[in-house]
Image (cartoon, rainbow, N blue to C red):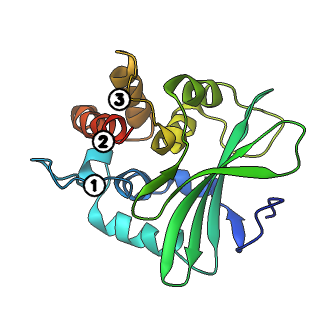
């Protein structure tokens, strides 16, 4: 897999990993700094268990294969999420793709701390809700939204944000009763860092 302007590692399509047990715990819990929370996150919030998370970690953080998750959008910028697995130094890079351009622009990264510009709530929703069916990548709204969620740098999310996040989490397999707990913690973390 090639992404022009981003040829520093052995990229492989990662979309098939989205349905594997342990993916969402790995992806969403990795961005959290839960130090001050009374309740620490657990994979069960996402309908997963520790063994699944550990098994998928081996795949996600393999230095020989860097999973890339393409989120193409129709007539607007799309995104690519890349696990940049340098030997001994793993991180996640977030790129924007633009119609008519043959390269991707890195807008953020996560390597223990978030750095970059990120997206507003409205930008995130616009990309999540406008898949480009002509391009390869994630087409379903819920995983598109969740892949983009770590990019949220907007302190003022609408009142509907919680319901939208709960719906996305349950669509990818999180139990209804724990999706609300995960949502509360994810939104609190994301809006606090803005």
Which residue sits at x=51%, y=42%? 151
Q: Is residue 65 left or right of residue 151?
A: right
Label 2 crowd bin: few (<14), some (14–19), many (20+), radius 10 Å: some
Which residue sits at x=36%, y=54%? 25
Q: Which mark is residue 137?
A: none
Secondary-structure class at tag 2: helix
Q: Which residue is mark 2?
A: 189
Up the image or down, 61 lies above or below 35; here it is below
Marks 3 and 1 sit apart, C-alpha to C-alpha, by 20 Å
**Residue 97 drawn at (x, y percent):** 75, 43
Secondary-structure class at tag 3: helix
Secondary-structure class at tag 1: loop
**Residue 17 drawn at (x, y percent):** 56, 57
Q: Is residue 156 left or right of residue 84?
A: left
| The furthest residue to the bottom | 87
**Residue 72 drawn at (x, y percent):** 73, 39
- Callout 2–callout 1 Cβ contact below 8 Å: yes
Q: Nearer the viewer, residue 139 or 126?
A: 126
Whichever of callouts 2 and 1 sits on the residue coming sooner in the sequence is 1
- Callout 3–callout 1 Cβ contact below 8 Å: no
Marks 2 and 1 sit apart, C-alpha to C-alpha, by 8 Å
Label 1 crowd bin: few (<14), some (14–19), many (20+), radius 10 Å: few
- Callout 2–callout 3 Cβ contact below 8 Å: no
Marks 2 and 3 sit apart, C-alpha to C-alpha, by 15 Å
Q: Which residue is mark 1?
A: 33
Whichever of callouts 2 and 3 sits on the residue coming sooner in the sequence is 3
| The furthest residue to the top | 159
Which residue sits at x=84%, y=59%? 4
Count of marks placed on residues = 3
Q: Which residue is mark 3?
A: 166
The answer to which quarter of the image holds residue 187 is top left
Label 3 vs label 1, nearer the camera? 1
């Amino acid at each position: 897999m090639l992404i022009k302007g981003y040829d520093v590692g052995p990229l492989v399509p990662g979309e098939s990993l989205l349905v594997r047990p342990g993916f969402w715990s790995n992806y969403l819990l990795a961005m959290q700094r839960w130090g001050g929370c009374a309740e620490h996150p657990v994979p069960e919030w996402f309908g997963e268990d520790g063994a699944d998370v550990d098994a998928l970690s081996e795949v996600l953080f393999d230095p020989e294969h860097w999973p890339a998750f393409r989120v193409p959008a129709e007539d607007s910028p799309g995104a690519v999420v890349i696990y940049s697995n340098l030997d001994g130094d793993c991180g996640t890079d977030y790129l924007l793709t633009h119609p008519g351009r043959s390269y991707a622009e890195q807008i953020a990264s996560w390597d223990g701390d978030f750095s970059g510009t990120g997206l507003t709530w409205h930008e995130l929703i616009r990309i999540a809700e406008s898949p480009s069916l002509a391009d390869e990548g994630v087409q379903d709204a819920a995983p598109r939204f969740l892949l983009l969620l770590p990019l949220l740098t907007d302190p003022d999310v609408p009142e509907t944000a919680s319901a939208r996040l709960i719906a996305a989490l349950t669509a990818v397999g999180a139990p209804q009763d724990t999706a609300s707990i995960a949502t509360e913690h994810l939104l609190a973390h994301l809006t606090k860092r803005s």
